[in-house]
Amino acid sequence: MIGDKLFWKSLIILIGVILLGIFQFKLINNPPFWLGLIGYIFIAIAGIWNFITSLPTKFKNIELFLSSFLDAISFFLTHFMGVEIRTAVFLLDKNLLTMNPPNVKIYFCSSNMNEAPDRKISFIKLQGLVGQVWGRKKGATADMTIGEGEGWASWNLSNNQISITHDIKAIYATPIKAGQNNEKMIGILSIDANHEFLFDDPSKGKVIDFFKYNDQFMEITEIAKKFISKMLVYFHIVFTME
């Protein structure tokens, strides 16, 4: 039985990789965008399978599932954009709710971030791009190759934060919201790379309100945000970020 499950799960992943490969490397003429998206969905399904058959504890379940889901997003965007992409979900630090000021930390991330020096990084409001998104409650992107003070935002990073993030060149961060009218901000989805993203805005080097790489990128991140939000609410892992 275990062997059968492993076979079918491996087959699902293989199909997803093949579809993504056809899309990325254009093995057919003008491969449609949906071909790559279906491949990405197949890989996500493998993550769901891991989730269903994982350890019974609530947090371990969602951690395994969301990590697999973030891996699928990172894999798809890496091949789609041509640079290695990392993804992470920041939530309010539940152990520090009584401290002033509160901060956010990484709760879930793609596997290519597990051993990274910034895996346990945290930010207070308006600190770094994640803190800027927290404070302004809207998505933004930043070119981290510029020096402090050259851009629109002051990052207010500590020496340690600068040291452990020095390889990061570009970041996109966007709020994860919940509630009947999406009135509650419950987390932040962060997508970064060790290579500059391509900006098509004359204000390159500044925090801008919309990530303008392409429409497909925005479609994927919007789908990911909604799905992550539903999973956090379903498992009651919701800390409202005021």
Image: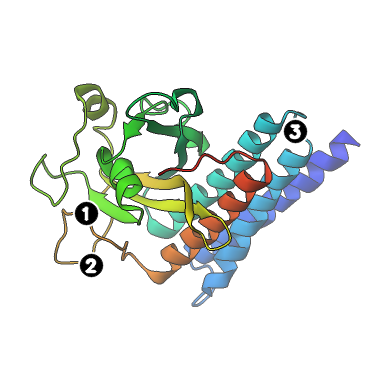
- Judging by the rendered image, the residue that carries numbered circle 3 is 54
Left/right of residue 65 with respect to residue 181 in the rendered view: right
Badges 2 and 1: C-beta atoms under 8 Å apart?
Answer: no
Report x, y in % for residue 131.
Answer: 31, 41
Which quadrant does the C terminus fall into? top left
Q: CA distance from mark 2 to mark 1?
A: 13 Å
The 10 Å Cα crowd at callout 3, few under 14, some 14 to 19, many 20 or more, is some
Q: Quadrant of residue 202?
A: bottom left
Closer to the camera in the image, 14 or 118: 118
> Which amino acid is tagged 1?
Val
**First in sequence: mark 3 vs mark 1:** 3
Colour logic = rainbow
Amino acid type assigned to the residue bearing label 2 in the image: Asp
* Residue, disc 2: 200
Which disc number belongs to residue 207? 1
Figure quadrant of the N terminus: top right
Q: Position of residue 227 (x, y in %)?
A: 59, 55
> Reading the chain from its start, which is encountered first: label 3 or label 2?
3
The image shows residue 142 at horizontal and vertical percentages of: 24, 50
Q: Is residue 92 visible?
A: yes
Report how far apart the C-alphas of labels 3 and 1 lie in the structure: 40 Å
Q: Is residue 184 left or right of residue 43?
A: left
Q: Residue at x 68, y 56 (%)?
A: 15
Element marked by disc 3: loop
Q: Is residue 205 left or right of residue 100?
A: left
Q: Pointer 1: residues within 10 angstroms few (<14), some, or many (20+)?
A: many
